[in-house]
Amino acid sequence: MARIIPLSEGSFTVDGTKQFTPFNLETDKMQDRPHGSLLVEIQPFLVITDRDYILFDAGLGFRNNDGVMQIHQNLINEGINPMEITKVMMSHLHKDHSGGISSVDPITGERTLSFPSATYYVNNEEMLYALEHAGKSYHSEDIVILQQRDNIVFTTGNGTIDGYIHYEVTGGHCPYHQVFLVDDGEDKVFFGGDVAPQISQMKNRFAAKYDYDGKRSMELRQEFLERGKKEGWTFMFYHDVKQPTARFE
């Protein structure tokens, strides 16, 4: 049976500058933030199966006041050593999902993978696209290390890993965005990255301006919602400030 652990790094607002500014849900007010700001959670997930410790996306890469990477601290708080992570599944490489892929050691100044024991799964075309479009959304300094290590699998198209983790290229949010379904025979756990980022977006039909192809993302959400209802998926929502997971009847 799969165990799901949300690894929230907190709530943030993001505006046209693509800066992520911490937001306290109890004390901060949206009207005080720049016009057009979005309120999002940054929430990687750990899924523990009888074979793997699977991380879905890697967070912002921020460090806490003690200098520890937030994603590492969140795992430690759950009693998990970051070295235990066996797989890192990347939906795409926008900085709010990939900032925690690697980090610079504060003492040595050397950049290392944040999960050196894991195999990282990254869409090959997304990797190339990210490096070509480095800037506000893609931070090449966080991700270029992926091309220099041998524990990285660059995927193309749709496929299956170890017979039970299915990946599918969707596009929509960005040209080579991908989603994952873990099916261990007992549970079906779905990670839709930024084509299924919040529960409200599953329930309401709308095309987001910040998507590469908003109409495609809208269609994908409807498609995944129907499939998930039929097959009993548990959805994991990376950007939902209130509800990390849900099942739809």
Image: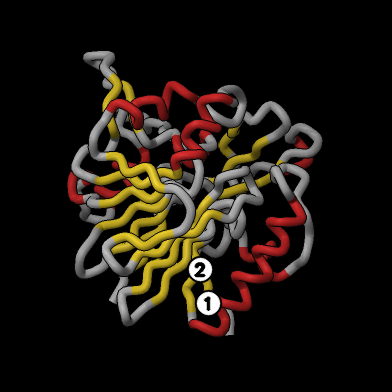
* 66 horizontally vs 35: left or right: left
Image marks 2 and 1: residues in contact by CB distance under 8 Å: yes
Task: Classify 10 Å Cα crowding around label 1: few (below 14), some (14-19), many (20 and above).
Answer: some
* 203 horizontally vs 100: left or right: right
Q: Residue 247: give its label.
A: 1
Task: Classify 10 Å Cα crowding around label 2: few (below 14), some (14-19), many (20 and above).
Answer: many
Q: Is residue 190 above or below residue 115?
A: below
- Work out whether residue 102 or residue 176 is closer to the camera in this orientation and state it: 176
| Secondary-structure class at tag 1 | loop
- Type of amino acid under label 1: Arg
Q: Quadrant of residue 28?
A: top right
> How many angstroms separate mark 2 from mark 1 (CA)?
6 Å
Can you see residue 238? Answer: no
Q: Residue at x 57, y 77 (%)?
A: 227
Q: Residue at x 65, y 36 (%)?
A: 14
Residue 30 percent coordinates (x, y): 73, 43
* 207 horizontally vs 13: left or right: right
Q: How many marks?
A: 2
Q: Quadrant of residue 160?
A: bottom left
| Among the two numbered marks 2 and 1 on one chain, the one whose residue lies closer to the N terminus | 2
- Work out whether residue 31 or residue 157 is closer to the camera in this orientation and state it: 157
Residue 123 percent coordinates (x, y): 45, 44
- Type of amino acid under label 2: Phe
Q: Residue at x 58, y 51 (%)?
A: 194
Can you see residue 71? Answer: yes
Q: Which quadrant is the C terminus positioned in?
A: bottom right
Query: Which residue lies under the disc numbered 2?
Result: 235
Residue 205 percent coordinates (x, y): 77, 65
Residue 186 percent coordinates (x, y): 32, 82
Q: Residue at x 81, y 35 (%)?
A: 35
